[in-house]
Image (cartoon, rainbow, N blue to C red):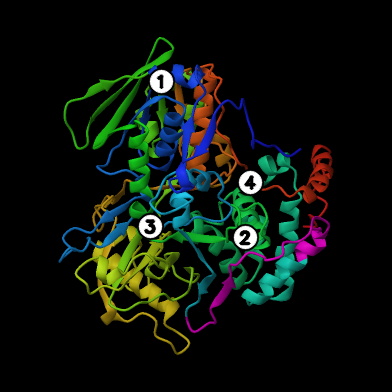
Amino acid sequence: MQRSHENPGPTRRRFLAAAGGAVGATASWPAGSAAAASSSKRVAVLGGGVSGLSAAQELAERGYAVTVYEYYDALGGKARSMDVPGTGTDGRKPLPGEHGFRFFPGFYRNLPDMMRRIPFPGNAHGVHDNLRSGTEALFARDAGRPDLHFPLRRATTPPAPGDLTTSWIRDQILSVLDEGTRLPAHEAAYFADRLLVHLTSCDARREDQWEKTAWWDFIRAGDMSREYQVVLGIGQTRNLVATRAEIASTRTVGRVIIEALLLWGLLGRGMDGDADIDRVLNAPTSEAWIDPWEAHLRSLGVEFVLGTEAREVVYEGGRVTGVRVAARGGGQERTVTADHYVSALPVEHARLTWGPALRAADPQLGRCDALRTDWMTGVMFYLRSPTPVVHGHINCLDSPWAVTGIGQAQFWDVRDFSRDYGDGRARDCLSAIISEWDKPGILYGKTARECTKDEIVAELWAQLKDGLNDSGKTTLRDEDRLGWFMDPAVTGLGGPDPQNREQLLIHPTGTLYNRPSARTAVSNFFLAGDYIRTDVDLATMEGANEAARRAVNALLDADNSDVERCRIRELFRPPEMEPLKRVDELRYRLGLPNTFDLG
């Protein structure tokens, strides 16, 4: 049965469009409602990233007094933009830097809903109107091999309900593989059949058999050509979500990347309105989204305490009684208190704040120690010439460091890069991300972790050129490169102990079983963040937002509030597949393979 959270809980809360609809939505509460009564309730939110800010907005709209404690001096976490120091002259802003480029797939629906509720001057639908669609993905090959171009426009005429049969889906998959890859016909056919197995698998099979099966093994990559392994194995895991196909959970890869992102995206099913598959912002992230979000939250009464590190969540007498915090980098500890506490820190930082007593109160906290993170960090290259490459994202399939990228200025239609940023010489920013930090590169024969920052920059540039400068064309020229930026959260490179404070949750087999729920066994303590067990089941901004909604709903339940719960939109489940999933559920209970699983 398809689960739905489209309209959960009571409906006493409503949103009313502000005058003219140009400033988004504001909360309106009936007189005497629980929201008004809750205004005296204080909530401490630990972490000012996407999940923390999402929780703060949902809570503030419901009348809670919210204070957000954030480690950095700016909000947004990994999503924020950072100024490149000393680069702005003659009234221009400094060059914009970031941890890595932002990507808003069309299957995101919870986060876009919130973006519509964040006012932005001149936009009828808030910061959501700052999204722009990419039209093509480039899978770049080295050694002169033909690049693969995938058009990313959704279908203008989605299939009618009766058309969405397994044979029709198989034909569509084969058509895309034939158009965009150089796979042998029998390998393309085998991959299409494997996708049908996953599409028609019941939830129980997915959460047991496929969660325990690596994507590499599920698609039998070890028995296939190098092209098959690179395009359908490595390219869909390491390059996109920084996890290796050899260990990545089939449930996660198949359900989110293959089904939600690619298949249903191309068919225009289960998307955010009329969105295309690939969307980015029309300006640096903080300008287009985070700064307006902060301003809106302040207008709702949210308070922010920046430059503050959460040291320990204090648990006494069956409740959380406070949080010990200190100024970032040191200083005297103090304890902050509230009625409720939402931990919205990344898992690698959150679990350091859970002491033995708190962990004993809820065993799921201890299981979070088994969750794994890895490095997925970017470098921004500032270029003299516009270098868009492709109107969308670039995936350098053959690069040993699993490099992806995007030319940003082409989407910043509200900015003139050389006029607005730096010293006027840079006209574009090529934002590239390294997802593989443990394999030797092509210049120095060292892994990224072993390189200095300068060596990483030279190596990354060489790998980009290897993928983009071939087949008689020169896309990237050394003389065009003016400078670069890397997130200062990465430290100690070239030394014995390199560190990265901003890592990414990865999804090896079995990860699902260690992901905690937003509700804990402690009545006034809740968890948010992209490591929480959510429907999207992937380390994404969408997962962070969904987790925040689940945490707020749990808090409202604990508070016996009768205000409307946060609406949670789950991933699209095509109704045409449900009868086949019910058949598979019976087969799974009987110990039989999926109908389409022929080995």
Circle 3 SS class: loop
Q: Earlier in the sequence, mark 1 or mark 3?
A: 1
> The C terminus appears in which quarter of the rendering?
bottom right
Compute the Cα span from label 2 to label 1. Answer: 43 Å
Taking the spot 75% from the left edge, 57% from the top edge, the residue there is 196
The magenta segment is 143-170
Residue 14 higher or lower than 280, as above or below: above
Identity of the residue drawn at 83% across and 57% down: 162
Which tag, 4 or 3, sits closer to the chain's start?
3
Q: Is residue 483 left or right of residue 282?
A: left
Q: Which residue corresponds to mark 2?
A: 262
Q: What amino acid is labelled 1 in the image?
A: Ser
Which circle marks residue 100 in the picture?
3
Q: CA distance from mark 4 to mark 2?
A: 13 Å
- 10 Å neighbourhood of mark 2: few (<14), some, or many (≥20)? many
- Tell me which corner region of the image, top left, top right, bottom left or bottom right, holds residue 94: bottom left
As helix, strand or loop, the secondary structure at mark 2 comes to: helix
Identify the residue position indicated by label 1 in the image: 39
Image quadrant where residue 535 sits: top right
